[in-house]
Amino acid sequence: MQWYYGFDFGADTVRMVTALTDEIRVEAAWSAFRRDADAPFAWGDRAYSYLGRQSAGITLSQAMRAGIPTDPKLLGKWMSRLVLSDEKRVLARRRALALVSPSISEGMGETLMSAALDAGMDVMGIAASDTAAALGCGLDVMGPEGCFLLDIGAEHMSFSAMAGGRRVLYRRIGYGMARADEAIREAVRQKEGVVVSERVARILKHAAFQDADRELTLPVFDPVSRLPKYMLLKPALAQDSLNEVVAGMLEMCFGAVNALTPSLAEDLEKNGLTLTGGGSLLGGLAECLQSALGVPVKAADDPQEAAARGLKMILDDSELYSPLINDWREAGLRL
């Protein structure tokens, strides 16, 4: 089976790759609806511009979050829209793969595929987001030795061990770095009496491991004067909130490592652990995890694009990577 389009739906973005080009198309994964309307009036980046600024009667929705479908029918429309808007489209058939979380239920996978086929896909298939991300990080998931991935997303974190084209161990916790962002905003509110945006919370978070006592001049909102202003804030404000999330991450990793067979444990010590996902960009995190786990830890290059890069590899050599495609169905063969 030759696949032509691939879709990676993250926490806030959708990425599309094709078999024709090396381009990774990135767009905000939001749709905007007016009251009682069945179809969105705005998609992608245009819909995202309404986030936090919704007027009366406008709601925002996501078809999938972190590889788990929240609205399969909307997801199918998203795929169809992206394919039809592809200026380089010269393919007669719409054969698409979508990445999903390994924790997705079989029933949800069935629903997802049926919705995509109803929205105009000729052939629809699914592959796991962790194996695609491992490929995109340069890991040899088809080889006999174990390779190991820690995916640190906004909405979840997972540990995957893969060998011989299959996943041999998977651990997941249902929260990610977005929890730290929320806790940092609350910590700033309580200790400094001001409100900061998610963007400012992320700046504090990324600086916390590197130079926690350095003062940063950042925009805040003063709830007393009800005016915006600039204020000196220390990244140390983020430390406790960040430590809580990292502690959960370490607990998951220790549980996964303890469940490895002796041979896989040897592979982990030899090959190390690769970090991917937006959270892996956190300065100093790889060193922190390496010290705690006692195995080599490195962050992937351009980790936010890793899953899309791996998906492109599957499109380009679907015969080699066919074991990574979990299921597929043609429009004429629907059950």
Image: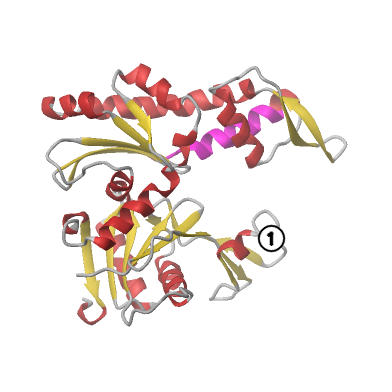
Looking at the picture, how far across and down is residue 323, in whole percent? 16, 55
Residue extending furthest toward the front: 21
Chief SS of the magenta region: helix
Looking at the picture, how far across and down is residue 260, in whole percent? 18, 29
Queried whether the magenta region covers residue 174, the answer comes back as yes
Q: Reply above or below: 221 against 64.
A: above
Give the labeled residue for mark 1. Answer: 54
Q: Reply above or below: 14 against 5.
A: above
* Picture quadrant of residue 225: top right
The magenta segment = 173-189
Q: Residue at x 76, y 36 (%)?
A: 220
Name the residue type under label 1.
Gln
Judge by depth and name the residue closer to the eye, 86 or 189: 86
- Locate the C terminus by quadrant: bottom left
Queried whether the magenta region covers residue 114, the answer comes back as no
Judge by depth and name the residue closer to the eye, 322 or 242: 322
| Colouring chosen for the image of the structure | secondary structure
Q: Reply above or below: 211 against 302.
A: above
